Each structure stands twice: as C-alpha cells, then as structure tokens.
Amino acid sequence: MTREIDLGILFSRSGTYSLISEAKRTGALKAVAQVNADPALDIVFNPVERDPQGNIDAYAPLCEEILRDSGARHVIGCTTSWSRKEVIPALERMDGALWYPAPYEGFEASDRIVYAHACPNQHLLPLLDYAFAQFGRRSYLTGSNYIWGWEINRLAREIGSRTGGEVLGERYLPLGTTEVARIVDEIAALKPDFVLNQLIGKSQYAFLDAIAELRRSDPFFAEGHCPVLSCNLTECELGAIGPSAEGVISAGPWFRGLHPALPGNGGREDFGSSLEAAAHASVMTLAQLLNGAPGAEALSLSELLAQRRAAELGISPRTHHTRLPVAIAQVRAGAFVPLRTGAPVEADPYLTRERDPAPVPLRVVK
C-alpha cells in the first residue's frame, strides 16, 4: 500500500538571495516528482510549502507552522546559516528535522539537521590550498555580515597564519547591501594576491561588477591577476552577474559537466548547480530511507540515519554530514570550467582531522 507523506519545503522565492533559494526549491520539487512517479517506491510525498520571502524573522514561525499544521516531520529548506540556526528551536519544539542543502561554515552538528552540502574541509581548505600554490599567500577577505562570512574568513585567517600567509584586509557588508565602493577601493590600494569573497546575493553581484571595472582601469588587476575566490558561487547566479563573473574561482561538490553528480542523486545529472543537486539528493535520500519501512517517518532523525542505507548514501550517523566530492572550477565564457577534481571526502565539521590540514588530493582537469 502506498503511503502519502507530507514533506515541508521552506525556501524564499524573493529577496536578496532568491536565485539561490529557487535553485534548491527546483531540485527539491524535481525529486518529489521523481519519487511520486516511481512505482518501485511505496511512498509519495505531498509538498507542504512556505515562503519566508527573504525575511529572516519568518523562517522559524513558518517552519513551526509546517510541523504543527501538517503531518510533515521533515523539512527541506533554508539558504543562509542565519536562517538554519533560526529554525533549530522550532525543530526541537515540534520534533522535526531539517535537510539543509547549502554550503556552510562548519562547527555545528545538530541532531535535527542533515547537512547535505559541503563544509569547510570540503570547500574552503582545498580552495585555499589551490590559491596558495597558484597565486600567493597575501589575501583580502570579504563577506556578508553574518555567521557564514565571519566563520569562513576566521578559518581562512587561521589557516593562512599557520602556513605563512598574510591577510591584508577584512571587510563585511550587511546582507543585501550593494555599497561596495569602500571595499573595492581598499583592494585597489592593497593589491592582494587574491580576494576570498563570501558575499551573498545582490551584494556579491555589485561587488563583482565593481571588481570588473577595477580590472578595466588598473593593469595590476588585469585578467589572471588577483582572482576572486568563493565557497558559495554556483551556476544558478551566473546569469544575473553576467560578464562580471568571468574568472571567479569557486569550490564545491559538483559543477555542471562533471560525472557523476552527488551520491544521493542516483546517477541523475540534469541539474543547474550543486545547490539544485543537493536539494534533489536530500529528497531522494529521505525517500530511500522511508521506502519499505512503514512508520519510519515517525522515527527521530538520528534513528533514521542509523540505518545502513544512510551510510551507503554518504550520510554520517554521527555528525549527520554528507560525504561529497571536491571540485574547484573557474568561470570562463559564462560557465564554470573544472580546474581540479577529487574523490568524495568525509565531512569533518569541527576540523578535528585538520588541525594541520593536509591538502585534499585533487586531479588536474585537462
């Protein structure tokens, strides 16, 4: 007998980071349609969707509403670390679980969350290893003014200081602001070897536009010099940024054209970005864990992830993080071109294995 299971969907369809959210929403709903059309599964998902509209204060109430007013115990959602942390109390009160398909800063392992995208040993560490070898060790750090930017740049500063690096400057912008002139003027004056950029959404678009103008006006910043590096830029935003994204180097678990996609995608690769792929993998993994197990939807997340199938799909029952490939790619002619790729790496959210980080072995893509 087919079981109908409510599934929460919590992504903003407007606001400063709406393109990122829409990519993940697309992946989640694509997976729901795939599950519901698969006769081999004994479940169908009924999406219960709420839209926070980019308002940080709306995430927790809407998450609680999903869990209170429907049968959903699992929610696929949130884009920023700020919103993820906002919903944890609601998850705890309502006995729910969040599948979070976005890169994040590590140093968290909630028993209410599956971390379905990359953490620092899967994005930042290999990116810095690549940057130090290719460009030098003098960096400039920037980011949106919340925990994602703070923590990624804190780690970058610590790693750089242990390996002979120097941070020439560090600046933050409120989420959504486009007033980037001061930061770009400082970069122009300091002339770092590279810029590590953790700005989000429209702030990032304005920043990259200004950097592109700097490249046209200052020969030091001509193509190939002082690249902008990112742990969060994916294909879903390239159309909005346009030519100003040219040359940006990003790290993530997957870029279009790499084979295969993520472990939970079941061989499917028709995704626009790793964000879409991670949201799809979240829903598909949940479906696999619930299939053939009546009542499993009522299990706690820790009980559900204790199944052997969860480990086979790459999710650690101890940390709830996901084993993921590592890739570094650069925007060329409007698309990401892989520079380095590596085998799947176990997540190490607290960097307990990385106090003196050994480089993640990456293969040069030719």
Image (spheres, grey):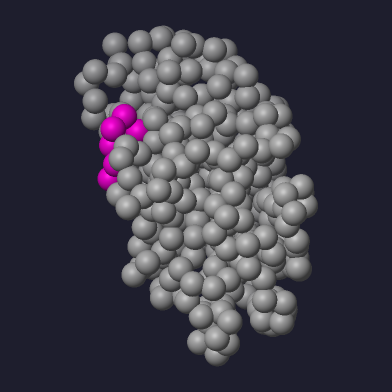
Question: Taking 29 as reference, is 109 above or below it?
Answer: above
**Most prominent secondary structure in the magenta stretch?**
loop
Question: Taking 140 as reference, is 162 above or below it?
Answer: above
The answer to whether residue 119 is seen in the rendering is no
Where is residue 296? Give x, y as percent.
47, 13
Quick check: is 267 in the magenta stretch?
Answer: yes
Q: Is residue 219 left or right of residue 240?
A: right
Q: Nearer the viewer, residue 365 or 276?
A: 365
Q: Where does the N terminus fall, quadrant-wise?
A: top left
Q: Is residue 3 left or right of residue 193?
A: left
Q: Is residue 189 left or right of residue 317?
A: right
| Rendered residue at 56%/66% (across/down) | 228
Quick check: is 195 in the magenta stretch?
Answer: no
Q: Residue furthest bottom?
A: 217
Quadrant for residue 167, please give it.
bottom right
Question: Taking 106 as reference, is 237 above or below it?
Answer: below
| Rendered residue at 34%/20% (across/down) | 43
| Rendered residue at 50%/87% (across/down) | 216
| Rendered residue at 63%/68% (across/down) | 193
Where is residue 318? Give x, y as percent.
62, 19
Query: How many numbered discs?
Result: 0
Where is residue 196? Give x, y as percent.
63, 61
The answer to whether residue 287 is seen in the rendering is yes
Q: Which residues are magenta?
A: 265-270
